[in-house]
Image: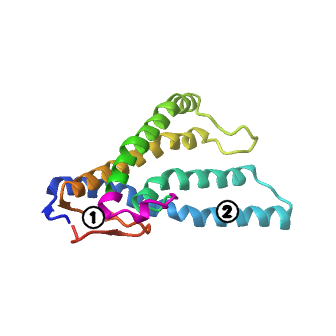
Amino acid sequence: MPTERAPPWLLRLAAGLELINAGLGRLVAWLALAMVLVTFVVVVLRYAFAFGSIALQESITYLHATLFMLGAAYTLQRDAHVRVDIFYQRLSRRGQAWVDLLGTLLLLFPVCLFVLFASFGYVSDAWAIREGSREAGGLPGVWLLKSLLLAMPVLVLLQGTVWVLRNALYLAGATVALPTTSGGAFTSDRDV
């Protein structure tokens, strides 16, 4: 059972990093509503007025990609990613902290770094030519959309850093807030 207080500067660092992802997550959540509304408009225009717009149709893809790429770190923060809980749910809180710590260090970080480095040339090429849609009348900002390939791993790495800090501090005996396994808000023995 944790008994020590965590170093305040580490808690402030973790809280600051989480503010970035929490704010961005809440902001991009509204894109789901925008996506539904744009889809509705596309369907009405097409079937009621026999009018199609490539740009409007592409905007749905842009909204969808932005929602998922920028929302991935927020989802990690809320412990809401899909996982197979056959063994994890039966572990003690300490066992779960070990799984989260090692999983973050050995799986999450390497995958994010791979995506970041593998995407860099692809994204920089798109920026160099200010890549636009292949479709006539499509949206011109494909280069911005491809930039999400760099933003997503950076944001997930930031959130992974918070997970490493919180789980390492917890395992060291400090009282810190750990994500709940239900995908909800953070819980701890005492509010930190």
* Magenta stretch in the rendered image: 82-96
Near-viewer residue (84 or 53): 84
- Mark 2 and 1 residues: CB-CB less than 8 Å, in contact? no
Q: Is residue 12 visible?
A: no
Q: Residue at x 16, y 58 (%)?
A: 6
Is 64 drawn above or below residue 115 in the view shown? below
Name the amino acid type tagged 2. Val
Near-viewer residue (130 or 107): 107
Instruction: Look at the image and tell me in which quarter the C terminus lies.
Output: bottom left
Quarter occupied by residue 167: bottom left
The answer to whether 142 appears left or right of 137 in the picture is: left
Q: Point out the frontmost of discs 2 and 1.
A: 1
Labels 2 and 1: the sequence-earlier one: 2
Task: Give the image location of residue 10, x and y in percent.
Answer: 20, 53
Q: Which residue is mark 2?
A: 38
Q: Residue at x 48, y 53 (%)?
A: 72
| Mark 1 closeness class: few <14, some 14–19, many ≥20 residues within 10 Å | some
Q: Which residue is mark 1?
A: 177
